[in-house]
Amino acid sequence: MNPSAAALEHPPEVDPTDFANAAINQKLTPEEKIHLLDQMLHIRRFEEQSGNQYQKGRIGGFLHRYDGQESIAVGCASLMGEHDHMITAYRDHGHALAVGMGMNECMAELFGKATGCSKGKGGSMHYFAPDKNYWGGHGIVGGQTPLGTGLAYYLKFKGLKGSCMCFMGDGAINQGAYHESLNLAGLFNLPVIYIIENNGYSMGTSQCRSSAFKNSLAYRADGYNIVWDIIHGWDLYEMRAKLQIAIERAHNENRPTVIEVMTYRHYGHSVADANAKKYRTEAEIEQYKQQNDPIVLWKDRLIQEGVLTEEKYNEIDKAAKTLAAEAVTFAENSPFPEPSAITEDVYYEVDQFTEAGRTGKHFFND
Ligand SMILES: Cc1ncc(C[n+]2csc(CCOP(=O)(O)OP(=O)(O)O)c2C)c(N)n1
Ligand SMILES: [Mg+2]
């Protein structure tokens, strides 16, 4: 269980009785609300297929599923503008699909095929789409935090009105790189939003056994003079309402935010840990699945609002399942990369023969 959930001491900056009333949510059209559901279902059905295909031996390496956490990536992606960026850790499928990457390129990447988003050479933990402001996909716990801080530095340096949403797990907050990042972000006033997806566990270790904290994990931000907040991640309205405040802080004041999002993963840490019931009780898993599944909650909410019917839901879900199944066929039928491709795509600047690659000077020098 996530202890932080019981310690909501920080006053919310928007109406906590119903986040649907926040201006950013009031603006949503029925079509947009359905689209958010569609995206969450895409992720859920993609992950089901990824798990199935792994078990069939078609996928090598690691695989970390995002089932249960969908509303976080989808809520955040729905708020992205031209200069808003995302970077995350190895649990990266949900963010990828949420920013608009296709199931085919994502499934093919899992299969190690040349048609994958990283040409089959990255696998599950290394999805990238720079054209969609999506910077991966990183396997080293906390390794993405300095990179995300750097992206925010870039935005400020260039005078762009944007933000970098830098996602991590609750286990990453004890890494030195995270603290160095917070220090620089607080010191330089960088438009970065550190989003801790607190699913209660780092592999098989519960939050209580891995982190020393007062009140909440986000509260540590106080020490770096960074504003922080807590979000119940399973509520898409709350996710969007509170994240929007952080985005505006980044856009208008060039200031960072730390957000702790309460969430839960339905399955094991990775495929190597399919027996996730060893370190958490069956009752806890069931409770989250029954009461805190972001898709069920959003579905119920939309039916209550008269925006959705059971029939429409089934239709959307069926289409998501079909897309996921088609992605498997696409991946199966795609070729593996040529052995000669192993030396390609190692360093972008050199491969592309860019000015930076030739001169060794990057954007800070122009
Ligand atoms: C620096 C480093 N140490 C250890 C690992 C092994 N490892 C991979 S995932 C993980 C747990 C991280 O949990 P959390 O940050 O809560 O993310 P979650 O998996 O829950 O999304 C660990 C210890 C690693 N990849 N990198
Ligand atoms: Mg975790």
Image (tube, rainbow, N blue to C red):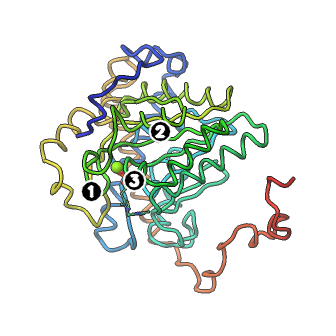
Give left or right: position of 104 versus 284: right
Q: Is residue 324 above or below residue 156?
A: below
Quadrant in the picture for the N terminus = top left
In front: label 1 or label 3 = 1
Give left or right: position of 5 versus 11: left
Q: Position of residue 283 (x, y in %)?
A: 12, 42
Ranked by sequence position, the earlier of labels 2 and 1 is: 2
As measured in the structure, the alpha-carbon distance from the residue carrying label 2 to the one carrying label 1 is 21 Å
Q: Residues within 10 Å of mark 3 (few under 14, many from 20)?
A: many
Q: Are marks 1 and 3 in contact (CB under 8 Å)?
A: no
As measured in the structure, the alpha-carbon distance from the residue carrying label 1 to the one carrying label 3 is 16 Å
Q: Position of residue 307 (x, y in %)?
A: 41, 21
Furthest-bottom residue in view?
339
Give left or right: position of 192 versus 95: right
For label 3, the residue is: 46
Ranked by sequence position, the earlier of labels 3 and 2 is: 3
For label 2, the residue is: 74
